[in-house]
Image: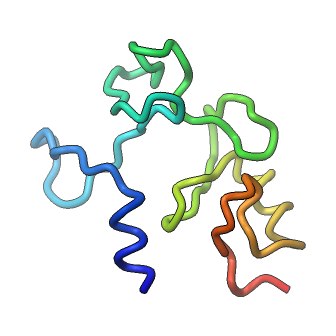
Amino acid sequence: GNKGNLRSKCTLVPNSGVASGVTFAPVCGKCMEPVTNPNFICLKCNEYAFQCSICCSAVRGACTWCPLCGHGGHADHMMQWFQHHKVCPTGCGCICNPQSN
C-alpha cells in the first residue's frame, strides 16, 4: 500500500539530537543530498533546497508538500492547484489530494 511507497520515496537523515521525535531536513531536489546549512542552499549544487512545483521559484515563506511524493511549493500556489486537481502538478502521477473535486 501507500506505507511502503512512502518509505521508498523518503530519505532518512539521522536526528542530530536537537529535539526528540521527527526532524524535517530539506533535501536538494537536484542531487538529493541533505541540506544542512541555515540558508537552505545546497553546498554541492548551489541550489536553493525548496523550489515550488508550480512556478519553479525558491520557496522562502509558507509552503506545503505531499507526504507521499515529496513535491510541493508555495502554499498559495499549491492551494490554487488542488482546488481543481487531485494529481501532483509535477506529473509524477501521485494523487496528492484525494478529497478534491
Horizontally, is 96 left or right of 91 in the view? Answer: left
Name the residue at 85% across, 61% down.
Answer: 80
Horizontally, is 25 left or right of 91 in the view? Answer: left
Front-lying residue, 101 or 95:
95
73 in relation to 36, above or below: below
Front-lying residue, 8 or 12:
8
5 in relation to 75, above or below: below
Residue 82 location, quadrant: bottom right
Q: How many marks?
A: 0
Quadrant housing the C terminus: bottom right
Measured as percent of width and height from the top left, residue 44 is found at 40, 14
101 in relation to 26, above or below: below
Front-lying residue, 4 or 48:
4
Front-lying residue, 63 or 41:
41
Measured as percent of width and height from the top left, residue 46 is found at 50, 12
Measured as percent of width and height from the top left, residue 79 is found at 78, 62
Name the residue at 60% across, 53% down.
Answer: 71
Name the residue at 42% across, 86% down.
Answer: 1
Residue 34 location, quadrant: top left
Q: Residue furthest right?
A: 84
Colour convention: rainbow
Measured as percent of width and height from the top left, residue 12 is found at 25, 50
Horizontally, is 55 left or right of 27 in the view? Answer: right
Name the residue at 77% across, 57% down.
Answer: 89
